[in-house]
Image (cartoon, rainbow, N blue to C red):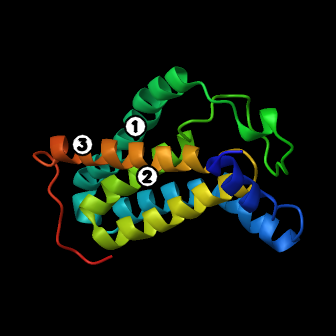
Amino acid sequence: MNLDYQIFQLINSLAGHYKWLDDVGIFFAAYSQYFLGGGIVAWTLLKDRMNFWKNFKITAYFFATAIVSRFIFGEIIKRLVARPRPFEFHQVTQLIPEDLHMSFPSGHITFFFAFSTAVYFYNKKAGLICYAVSFLMGLARIYTGVHYPADILGGMALGFLVGWGMWKISKKFIEAPQQKL
């Protein structure tokens, strides 16, 4: 038995025993993404109404970074690796429904770590909040039985690398302010 599966079993074995923990896991695995994305959109667009167009472009950059990471690089890797999800071959406690789509890297985590990296280079405090929520999202996706830990780590690494690369490319076009959150 490999270490990835052992860690998966350790985390997923907690599922189904405590309703409150299951509710927290389900929230972070399936719903926190909407609060994170919506919160950053609202914060970016509404913080300085005099510069709405500039803030709109920054918000578009956050999502473009995440989309490139998830739907271009992430999909290429998913198709090359073609790793099945844990519930396809193991007895797991699966708390959220998930398609029988390839597991590595986690698309959610690839998207949100790229998003968090884009936000971080724009505003450090907001970026750290995004990273924390994205990390909890990844942990919850293991807890709820839809990803192995390596899927999450792969998504984190890919998201960060693409986010960093997009920042290097786009920093000529988007100026990061020295503002507090």
Q: Secondary structure at mark 1?
A: helix
Inspect the image, locate mark 2, and give the three-letter code of the amino acid beneath it.
Answer: Phe
What distance separates the C-alpha of mark 2 from that of mark 3? 13 Å
Relative placement, left or right, of 33 versus 12 is left
Amino acid type, callout 1: Ser
Q: Which residue is mark 1?
A: 69
Q: Which residue is mark 3?
A: 165
- Which residue is more in the foreground, 150 or 123? 150
66 in relation to 50, above or below? above
Q: Amino acid at mark 3?
A: Gly
The residues tagged by marks 1 and 2 sit, at their Cα atoms, a distance apart of 9 Å
Side (left or right) of 103 relative to 120: right
Does label 3 or label 1 sit earlier along the sequence? 1
Q: Quadrant of residue 21?
A: bottom right
Q: Residue at x 67, y 28 (%)?
A: 101
Q: Secondary structure at mark 3?
A: helix
Q: Can you identify the residue that label 2 sits on? A: 113
Could you tell me if the residues under marks 1 and 2 are in contact, i.e. CB atoms within 8 Å?
A: yes
Q: Is residue 26 visible?
A: no
